[in-house]
Image (tube, rainbow, N blue to C red):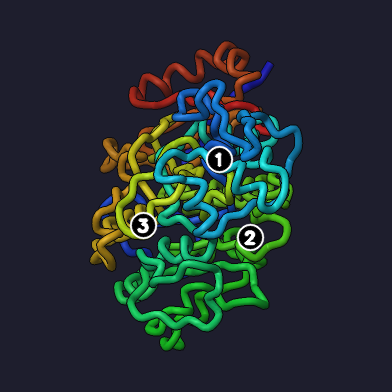
């Protein structure tokens, strides 16, 4: 029999100090993590996720030789890299037909790989997050094109005219979200995998790069886990593993290995003192040449480009919600801007949706505490409203064995959610 331990209540305000004084936002979110992985389309990761705008049944595309290639499950944890330049993506898009992915892929190898998809067999943790937090199924890369110009949109609201990954000789005018945060006294850090090919991307913006006080905020990715364990956590943290050869998920890397790294990071955040006030945005920089069936809305000369997977993970994220709102990387910028009353830096940021549709702040204002741990695979999270997380295989046993203990709690907190989690390997 599984026995419920005593509910030990700890005040959420009693924690080790973080990296700076916390500046309150307009929502209960005071800490934001932006984790941006590499090169996968929405249909490639979540195309068969129940309830999502996924791969149409029986869909196929021309192979360029008079035949067709159908969408299919990838019986592996990796594929070869695919063409994903601006020119390649524009050709695959084909003025909204989205039907030349295989033909483009043939330029580098078998066109069949472009039509492949993964599912919960390779990505159990990502699918479990989607079941228990919010999955955005109309979140687009900001432009047709490769990694670096798309990443610029996530903190500058623009690609600054860059169309390729050749950034090393660039120097851009304009501000970034980091300039704005610093001016308002909001702590931030940019964790990155050091590269021999280029500097951390925000440092190609002249105003930021010329401010020597900012340079210490660019930190090697290898320090991230230790900083979280120590409670040394900035209010806004960007995580950029782009140049990692193992965990960015850029083909031909092992996607399950990349997911395992991400799981370790997210679970460390969820175990940290700041979890109860945190929003994690997990997204991918661009679609990597993989098939996606949704024609992207064209908002300016650059795009949007194709859909990319995006998850919103937070105590305030809507539970098991699939958000159909149109978003892109500038939407994350806008969420940060609206949360701390920052001005919009570009027209793209101004016109973007701000991710608020993924959250439920309706109970904000009620005083709750952080976490109490239960014996067995269950966790009571005292957020607003409180949530009891149960692992599916023991759900019945816990509720049966502890009915008398749980009933007073549930009666005292009528808005409590009982959240049944999928097993995550």
Is residue 218 positioned above or below 206 on the image? above
Q: Tell me the residue that label 3 is attached to.
A: 330
Farthest residue toward the front?
66
Q: Is residue 288 rendered to the left or right of residue 159?
A: right
Disc 2 or disc 1, which is closer to the eye? Answer: 1
Residue 207 position, x and y percent, is 37, 83
Q: Is residue 134 rendered to the left or right of residue 182?
A: right
Q: Is residue 300 rendered to the left or right of residue 69?
A: left
> Which residue is at a point 65% across and 54% down the rendered structure image?
250
Spatial CA distance of label 1 from label 3 is: 23 Å
Residue 264: mark: none
Q: Nearer the viewer, residue 276 or 167?
A: 167
Residue 317 position, x and y percent, is 40, 39
- Label 2 close to label 3 by CB (< 8 Å): no
In which quadrant is the N terminus drawn? Answer: top right
Spatial CA distance of label 2 from label 1 is: 34 Å
Q: Nearer the viewer, residue 252 or 1?
A: 252
Q: Tell me the residue that label 1 is attached to.
A: 291
> Which residue is at a point 76% across and 37% down the rendered structure image?
76
Q: Tell me the residue that label 2 is attached to.
A: 225
The total number of labels drawn is 3
> Which residue is at a point 67% across and 47% down the rendered structure image?
106
């Amino acid at each position: 029999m599984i026995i419920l331990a005593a509910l030990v209540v700890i005040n959420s305000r009693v924690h080790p100090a973080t990296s700076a004084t916390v500046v309150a936002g307009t929502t209960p979110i005071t800490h934001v993590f932006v984790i941006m992985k590499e090169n996968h389309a929405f249909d490639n990761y979540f195309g068969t996720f129940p309830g999502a705008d996924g791969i149409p049944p029986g869909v196929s595309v021309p192979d360029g030789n008079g035949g067709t290639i159908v969408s299919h499950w990838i019986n592996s944890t990796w594929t070869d890299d695919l063409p994903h330049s601006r020119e390649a993506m524009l050709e695959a898009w084909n003025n909204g037909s989205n039907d030349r992915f295989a033909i483009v892929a043939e330029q580098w190898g078998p066109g069949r790989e472009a039509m492949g998809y993964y599912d919960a067999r390779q990505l159990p943790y990502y699918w479990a997050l989607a079941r228990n937090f919010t999955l955005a199924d109309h979140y687009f890369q900001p432009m047709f094109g490769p990694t670096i110009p798309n990443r610029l949109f996530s903190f500058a609201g623009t690609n600054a005219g860059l169309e390729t990954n050749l950034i090393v000789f660039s120097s851009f005018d304009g501000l970034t979200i980091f300039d704005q945060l610093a001016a308002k006294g909001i702590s931030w850090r940019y964790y990155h995998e050091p590269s021999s090919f280029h500097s951390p991307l925000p440092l190609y913006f002249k105003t930021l790069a010329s401010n020597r006080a900012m340079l210490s905020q660019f930190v090697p990715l290898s320090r991230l886990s230790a900083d979280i364990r120590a409670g040394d956590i900035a209010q806004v943290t960007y995580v950029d593993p782009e140049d990692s050869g193992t965990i960015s998920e850029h083909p031909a890397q092992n996607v399950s290995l990349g997911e395992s790294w991400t799981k370790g990071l997210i679970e460390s955040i969820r175990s940290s003192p700041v979890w109860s006030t945190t929003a994690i945005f997990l997204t991918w920089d661009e679609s990597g040449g993989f098939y996606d069936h949704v024609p992207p809305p064209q908002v300016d000369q650059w795009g949007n480009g194709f859909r990319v997977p995006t998850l919103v993970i937070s105590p305030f994220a809507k539970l098991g919600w699939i958000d159909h709102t149109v978003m892109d990387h500038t939407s994350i910028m806008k969420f940060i801007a609206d949360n701390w009353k920052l001005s919009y830096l570009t027209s793209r940021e101004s016109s973007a949706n701000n991710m608020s549709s993924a959250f439920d702040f309706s109970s904000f204002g009620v005083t709750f505490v952080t976490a109490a741990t239960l014996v067995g695979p269950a966790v009571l999270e005292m957020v607003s409203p409180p949530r009891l997380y149960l692992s599916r295989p023991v759900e019945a046993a816990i509720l049966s064995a502890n009915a008398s203990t749980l009933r007073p709690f549930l009666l005292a907190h009528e808005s409590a959610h009982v959240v049944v989690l999928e097993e995550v390997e």
